Image (spheres, grey):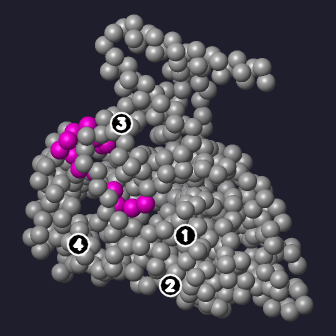
Amino acid sequence: MAITLTFHGACATVTGSCFELKTDQASVLIDCGMFQGTKTVKALNYGSFPFDPRRINAVLLTHAHIDHCGLIPKLTGAGFMGPVYTTPGTSDLLTYILPDSGYIQEIEVSRLNIRNRQRGLPAVEPIYTQSGAESALHSVRPQGYDTWFTAAPGIEARFWNAGHILGSAAVEVRVQDSGKSGEALSILFSGDIGPSGKAFHDTPQGPSDIDFMLMESTYGDRIRPTRTNERRLQILEREMKAAMAKHGIILMPAFAIERTQELLFDLDTLFDAKRLPEVPVFVDSPLATNATKVFAKHLGERANTEGSHAFQRHNLRFVGSTEDSKKLNRLRGGAIIMAGSGMCDAGRIRHHLKAHLSRSDTTVILAGYQAPATLGRLLYDGEKIVRIHGEEIAVNARIRMLDEYSGHADQKHLIDWALARAPLRHQLFLVHGEENARAQLAALLGSAGFPRKDIRMPVIGETVRLSKRDGARTTRVRATLQPGDAQRDWHNDYAATVIALKEKLNTLTDQRQRAKLLKRLERQVDGARTKRQRR
């Protein structure tokens, strides 16, 4: 029986997680996530799937982050009729995250179409709608940890706690190999592996003695200091006091799932201990509000501090309507506004940034990984002017990063997790990481005892054939991304050029100098156009 594995996403990028495991009897997807980052990468969300959704028997979902689950409604809309297996915690979170994703897409596309109409460009459609996402929820089938179940004919699976977010899982899969041995072939998909010392989760787990493994490598090039709960509290306390000393607004772009709840938990601890003044905290995200209810349900006592619930405070307010969200922009200081998205690419945080980035008394605290070319990454990289909703906004705010709240294991913990899975009979595939992170992690894993020839860094569109006896062999590559597309594309260069041109024109005081500069630029553009026409 032929067993193949195709990498449809999360290669040389940390988004778009999707892997197709196919046999003569069935096909299953492990994750079906949305691409984030550059416009070139995000364009992959709009095209047709590189497989027939009607021929997919099931989806095995690792967790409820958009880059892992975000295209499931598109999949069902394209004809997929099978079950989506995941843990109970993830199932509850999907109830809110998928409809919220559809709603955000409708709002963002509506705003984009207004600008397109003004520019004479055609209208675009959202990837899926809120109602489409709600329909997709009927496919979800919760399964507990540590229990084998039949995912599709000839394919069994079980979930292991990955320690990343509520409900997150590594997926162990067994496929019956009809080769001479007749033994089952085993594959482990790590999903996203959590770090040690998280407030809500135990140490990530997983099986050992497997044939193949796919492991994330998000922070394969980074080692963090030893993490403890008190260290995390000290860092948050220090950053908050420095921000409060400026007497401005504190903006916290936070992922609605897990990151918001962790921050609320720690702020609650600091408020109760009188280590921070009890300033108003606004959670301006309907998704985060609903997700917090799910966390309260599943975590029980772990969401309580000193006998009181961390998500219920007199100075904590959950903002509902869009109008109430807009009213927050009238505030000028003495408040914390926590809103999505965590990478500042969509959601309510964008209009708060638009209102406050130009103020020197504003502090923006990023609390997690920022994908290349996202607004969050541009702020982290120190851009002085950014574009939000088509407008140029000066960045005078103080930008800070709280890496202590990352949901991903660092380099050391990734290596420790991989070693704990030994023995590994065949290939280790490094996925879900930028190229530098994968390369550094591959080198260290080789030094740690994994055969270097068996450490692979696949590309999107690569298909490998898996054999219990012979290992993995690449049979086809249909690359959909070029090297570097996930880092910075021509859209980023265009925006930077426009901003630089405007700044240069503003420095010129003579009208003739401005006209001369524009004329020279026009000649260069015309020359490039003529050269293309001659070809």
Q: Which residue lies under the disc numbered 2?
A: 416
Magenta stretch, residue numbers:
351-369
Numbered label attached to residue 333: none
Q: Which of marks 4 and 2 is in front?
A: 2
Numbered label attached to residue 440: 1
Q: Where is residue 322 in the image (x, y as percent from the top left)?
A: 33, 42
Q: Which image quarter: residue 452?
A: bottom right
Q: Position of residue 462 (x, y in %)?
A: 75, 62
Instruction: Specify which label sits upstream in the sequence, 2 or 3.
Output: 3
Instruction: Specify which label sits upstream in the sequence, 1 or 3.
Output: 3
Q: Which residue lies under the disc numbered 4?
A: 233
Question: In the drawing, does residue 164 fall left or right of residue 269?
Answer: right
User: Residue at the top extreme?
Assistant: 512
| Residue 366 sits inside the magenta stretch | yes
Q: Which kind of residue does numbered mark 1 sit on?
A: Gln
Instruction: Specify which label sits upstream in the sequence, 3 or 4.
Output: 4
Q: Nearer the viewer, mark 1 or mark 3?
A: 1
Label 3, secondary structure: give it: strand
Instruction: Specify which label sits upstream in the sequence, 2 or 1.
Output: 2
Mark 2 → mark 1, Cα distance in angstroms: 15 Å
Q: Position of residue 495 (x, y in %)?
A: 48, 33
Q: Which kind of residue does numbered mark 3 sit on?
A: Ile
Above or below for 512 versus 382:
above
Label 4, secondary structure: give it: helix
Q: In which quarter of the image is the C terminus?
A: top right
